[in-house]
Amino acid sequence: MTERLAAMERELAEVKGAAAPAVLNPLRRTVPSVTSELLAKHGIGDGPVDVRALDAALAGLSLEQRIAVKSQLLRAGSIG
């Protein structure tokens, strides 16, 4: 039982170590330029974003793309 637990802990440490470089900097407060350009085309500028205006601006994107954009804005602190 303890061998199995130790093996699982090693595997978890390996997974965490492999994922660490892929994690974005949590202190980053900017969004990619593509996202900024997309929002600017719909009149959404810097600062807090109105969710209704954001949903209208993202209507032409796929579900995955909308989730990605909203995640970027959430990390940047533009939506809450």
Image: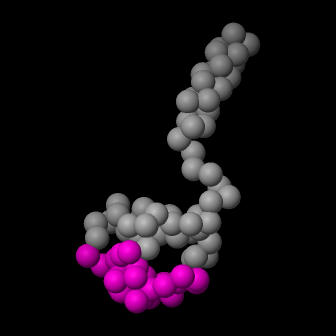
Image quadrant of residue 12? top right
Q: Which residues are magenta?
A: 37-60
Q: Is residue 28 visible?
A: yes
Looking at the image, which is closer to me, 64 or 28?
28
Q: Is residue 1 visible?
A: no
Looking at the image, which is closer to me, 15 or 33?
33
Q: Residue 61 in the image: x percent, y percent?
A: 28, 70
Is residue 56 one of those drawn in magenta? yes
Residue at the spot 65% in from the left edge and 26% down from the top edge: 13
Q: Is residue 52 left or right of residue 24?
A: left
How many numbered dots are placed on residues in this image? Answer: 0
Q: Is residue 56 above or below residue 72?
A: below
Task: Assign the N terminus to one quadrant of the image.
Answer: top right
Residue at the spot 54% in from the left edge and 82% down from the top edge: 46
Q: Is residue 25 above or below residue 32?
A: above
Instruction: Name, please, the residue furthest toward the right.
Output: 2
Image quadrant of residue 35? bottom left
Image quadrant of residue 17? top right
Q: Is residue 23 left or right of residue 52?
A: right
Instruction: Name, please, the residue furthest toward the top.
Output: 3
Q: How is the image coloured?
A: one colour
Q: Is residue 69 left or right of residue 65?
A: right
Q: Is residue 39 left or right of residue 28?
A: left
Q: Residue 31 in the image: x percent, y percent?
A: 51, 66
Residue at the spot 65% in from the left edge and 55% down from the top edge: 26
Is residue 50 one of those drawn in magenta? yes
Residue at the spot 61% in from the left edge and 32% down from the top edge: 16
Q: Residue 9 in the image: x percent, y percent?
A: 68, 23
Q: Residue 78 in the image: x percent, y percent?
A: 58, 76
Task: Assign the C terminus to one quadrant of the image.
Answer: bottom right
